[in-house]
Amino acid sequence: MGRNVRDLAVGVLRLAGAYLLINSLLAFVVLGQPGLKNKKPAESLNRSPMPSYRTAPGTGLVVLTVFGESAKALDRQALIKLVNVANQTITWQTTEDLSRGALTDLPYGKYELEVSAVGYLSTKKEVLVTKSEPLQIDIELRRDPAARQSDEAVRIVLPRARKAMKEARSELVLNAPDLKRAQKYLDDAYASAPFSAELNYMLGYLNFRKKDYKQAANYLETAMKLKPTFTPALTLLGRARLMQHNYAEAQSALEGAVAAERENWLTHYLLADAHLQQKNYSQARDEAQIAIAQKKRDVTLARIVLGQALVGLGSEEQGIEALSLILKESLHYPIAAEHVRDLIKEVRAREGGDASAEIAAVLERDSLEELDRPQLSVATWQPPGIDDSRIPIAPNVPCASEKVVEEAGKHVAELADDVARFAAIEDLFHQSVDEFGNPGNFEIRKYNYVASISEQQPGFLEINEDRIDRLNDRQGSPDGIGTTGFAALALVFHPHMRDNFDMQCEGLGDWHGEASWVVHFRQRDDKPNRIHGYNLSGSSYPVALKGRAWITATTYRILHIESEMVRSIPQIQLVSEHQIVEYGPVRFEKKKTSLWLPKSAEIYFDFQRHRYYRRHSFDHYMLFSVDTEEKRKEPVSPVEETPKPTEKKPG
């Protein structure tokens, strides 16, 4: 592809950049058929004139208008399922503009109608299709109470709220933060993003710093409901519950944190303390020992818990030995020394009796107070993980995984048969991000982008990409990193590729108001990885992907794909990567065809101790089809002047 080997190429290893989806959108023909009734669910509803539809002679027509609460037009697509009672054949359709959908060419008879939409309860009714007149039905859907929270949880945080959260985060990570100032920023953000897990976590952290542990716990519990795997929130919630002396709930939260992150000494120490206060001495001993082994130094507080737990188990001498070690070490918590000496004296003076009550009370007040202040988690610069996201799914709507995957794969497979080359104008935005998630320096470039698609051998597609800088003759790519093959994500569904992945349709979702099947995929460990990888210094590093795709409910076109790495690659210090690709129809008038092409591609990656964000945008497409004279010509870039055939620049 003419790429400079000194650049890092982020892209595919074998299958690169294939992302064209042939578009043959279904449409109803408007003819002007009289006699169609227009019924209203409410007298006050203003409805646009009813269009007319064509249906074959001897068949019926059903037109549905779907409303939400208060007889308002539904703000998203609904899925229509019509089952013929006589032979159990199923007809699927989605609503189009004005929340209206039409089903044509229906045999006369009795049907079971079901209408579903994300965030709403499904509605069923029996309908009778006759030859007397077209049937118009108004359906009013009721909100699903269980879906309200999940709907809110996935709302995009508005830019203003995101900016306020960044300002608050920058303040809260200081050793001496201005808590009032941080509170103001977070209050501003909360007004528009109350269901953000990140924001509720930050408010919990703020209130913990203010020592309002009850309020902190309230916010942290909300964060956990929105994002159950949010480990920093779990740990801080456990700590807040300990400060409230609510040891059972502290134990529950901390056990979840330990399960998610076993290498964190702090969660083991806090869990040990929660067990100690409930006189679960054996569990307290075990967790304290793990904390000591993991932290290696400054283990004063964990040794205090260990000593108390051993004494509680009747091993007074072992307990005294553990406590005595604290006095011999360089104390990170010097105030504890006096209490430790008092505790040792107390144990020795008991001569056997049960000193557990006194022991448990001696240091309870001071140990948690002396613990270092909690650190605010700042790993929020990239989108939530694939398996951390709560995706709203319509209830009780079955999804046929095999059919959805197969139909989506058919459209992807059409690519190699119908398209040889295409060109576009590409805009690249590249920006560095600091450890707090704050944006840094950025660079903008514009390219002439050309891609060619070929099948060199059966079952192996190859996409070659080339970029020529339109603005000047700069060498290399921003920060020496070239990114290619984003839309190769669509190849996950190609018939030659999909067996390499575990795929499961999660149900009926919604993408920007369009009803979509949501499919989760993950690279199989026992299959070859031919989709994505990193090339560095002449070596290739395959990247196993997992992700989620939104596929139109009735036409099976891919609208949106997100992916991330199954595991990091320590050999090249690649910690994380998150890709997002948006697709949409592009019309080519000269070819009299439409293709589904990538409108934009985003990538967030943590590479070699640096964090980057990139956005690629594509427009001004030109298509060079198979079986035309243009197929045998060198493609012309869609610019005023044709670039000369010079050395190709990486990008």
Image (cartoon, rainbow, N blue to C red):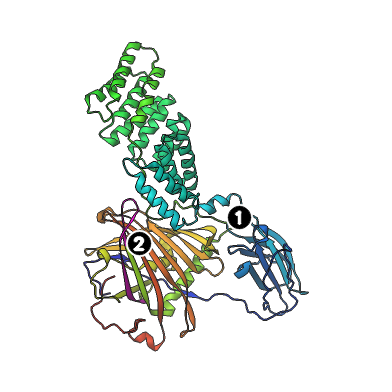
State the residue lying farthest toward the bottom: 629
Stretch in magenta: 431-453
Q: Is residue 644 left or right of residue 563?
A: left
Residue 114 in the image, given as x and y percentages of width and height: 66, 61
456 up-or-down from 526: above or below? below
Mark 2, secondary structure of its residue: loop
Q: Amino acid at mark 2?
A: Asn
* Identity of the residue drawn at 26% across and 25% down: 326
Q: Point out which mark residue 327 bears.
A: none
Kindly tell me whether residue 386 is visible in this rendering.
no
Secondary structure that dominates the magenta span: strand
Kindly tell me whether residue 382 is visible in this rendering.
yes
1 or 2: tag closer to the N-terminus = 1
Viewer-nearest residue: 643 or 256: 643
Mark 1, secondary structure of its residue: loop
Q: Amino acid at mark 1?
A: Asn
* Identity of the residue drawn at 40% across and 45% down: 182
To which quarter of the image does residue 335 belong?
A: top left
Q: Quadrant of the C terminus?
A: bottom left
* Identity of the residue drawn at 71% across and 66% down: 137
- Nearer to us: label 1 or label 2: 1
Residue 111 in the image, given as x and y percentages of width and height: 71, 65
Residue underneath mark 1: 396
Q: Point out which mark residue 529 bears.
A: 2
